Image (spheres, rainbow, N blue to C red):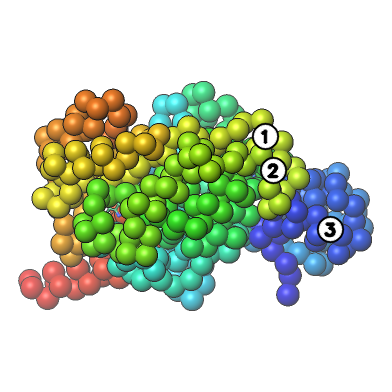
Amino acid sequence: MSINLLDFDQRGLADFCARLGEKPFRARQLMRWIHHCGESDFARMTDLAKPLREKLAQAAVVQVPQVISESVAGDGTRKWLLAVGAGNGIETVFIPEVSRGTLCISSQVGCALECSFCSTGRQGFNRNLTTAEILGQLWLASQALQGESAAQGAGERAISNVVMMGMGEPLTNFDNVVSALYVMLDDHGYGLSRRRVTVSTSGIVPNIDRLRAECPVALAVSLHAPTDELRDVLVPINRKYPLAELMAACRRYVGSAPEAERPLKGAGIPPELQGKWTREGSPRDFISFEYVMLKGVNDTLQHARQLIELTQDVPCKFNLIPFNPFPNSGYQRSEPEKIRAFQEALMSCGLIATVRKTRGEDIDGACGQLAGQVQDRTRRMQRLAQEASL
Ligand code: SAH
Ligand code: SF4
């Protein structure tokens, strides 16, 4: 069976080259061709010797998931539904803005964590995505967006930022996600700055520490509740890693806890990226806390006050996300005045709090609406139900 080179970061490619009897610098060349130039045909990799190209064609492939459909929303948001075998679909969303272009990537088929307000969580867990399937989303989107007017200030490329906020919990698919992150950061890969790559987690505490040590990119933490009592219901993983532990991990991540060491060097960090760590110091000066606004559940001023207290010694910013509804969710979005009052309560204490604009709603591309095939099934059920009642 052919080896998919999209599965490898630079170290993996170097090992692969060694197995073929090739020098390590071939790994850099391959990385450039595959990710920087978007080339999948070895025959066109012109600065590789012909015998090597032939050897590669025998042993390897560059294979991305198949695109099932692509939709573009009225606001320019694009969503791809990709096939990952066994009838499963995953979704990738591109959100163009004036000053940046953000790609939202999935890390798993479904999710095991069952947050009560999330449609991916409702679908249950199917499997982890491979590194190739995670990077394949970026590869495909980069190709599709090539030639589009680059976002202002984002340089040549339409995709200036990547967020792991699609389907799945990235920190429970740690190794595959981190290999993919290495390629995103690699100058021979996508060359993104660590501050422009964000991992979003529901709070897998031990793996927040591992990420800090091995690949300290920007971190978003899905908080959604200021007390254990409420968070246990909304984000059930809280029962395993309660708020006190989560806040301590956040402090360690931004390096403000006394026990925190700057991740200058780490055994897990590939040599080509060590310099990046040392030069840039801390990945972010703050944690981004995500907070979904659920009507009558977590949106009162009392909740805002509790939140201020909870996060008082964590350098952070808040991102308030108006709940994005899906069929039979059982939740409603907080009213705009409630969201504004909540935001003002946080800001009056000197915190930075933004309200996330919901993007791509008309194509179900907004946060928490991604559900791959299940979304389709739900729609089919809705249609059948409607037809039945006619
Ligand atoms: N599993 C990771 C990343 C994927 S979810 C995590 O939970 O952080 C990305 C963000 O969307 C998370 O903050 C998540 O809580 C939020 N989200 C999930 N369902 C939502 C919904 N229906 N409306 C608004 N945000 C939602
Ligand atoms: Fe999983 Fe994140 Fe959805 Fe929770 S919010 S079920 S962790 S994808």
Q: Is residue 352 left or right of residue 137?
A: left
Residue 94 can be seen, yes or no: no
Residue 286 in view, yes or no: yes
Q: Secondary structure at mark 1?
A: helix
Of 361 and 43, which appears nearest the observer? 361
Q: Which amino acid is tagged 1? A: Thr
Check whether the beta carbons of the residues at disc 2 and disc 1 lie within 8 A of each other: yes
Relative side of 195 to 385, left or right: right
Q: Position of residue 135 (x, y in %)?
A: 59, 53
Q: As rendered, which of 95 and 292 lies closer to the eye?
A: 292
Work out whether 235 lies above or below 272: below
Q: Which residue is mark 1?
A: 278
Q: Is residue 122 left or right of residue 78?
A: left
Which residue position is annotated with label 2?
265
- Mark nearer the N terminus (2 vs 1): 2
Q: Which residue is mark 3?
A: 17
Which residue is at a point 32% across and 36% down the rendered structure image?
Answer: 312
Q: Nearer the viewer, residue 231 or 362?
A: 231
Residues packed near mark 1 inside 10 Å, few (<14), some (14 to 19) or many (20 plus)? few
Are there few (<14), some (14-19), or many (20+) residues within 10 Å of tag 2? Answer: some
338 lies left or right of 227? left
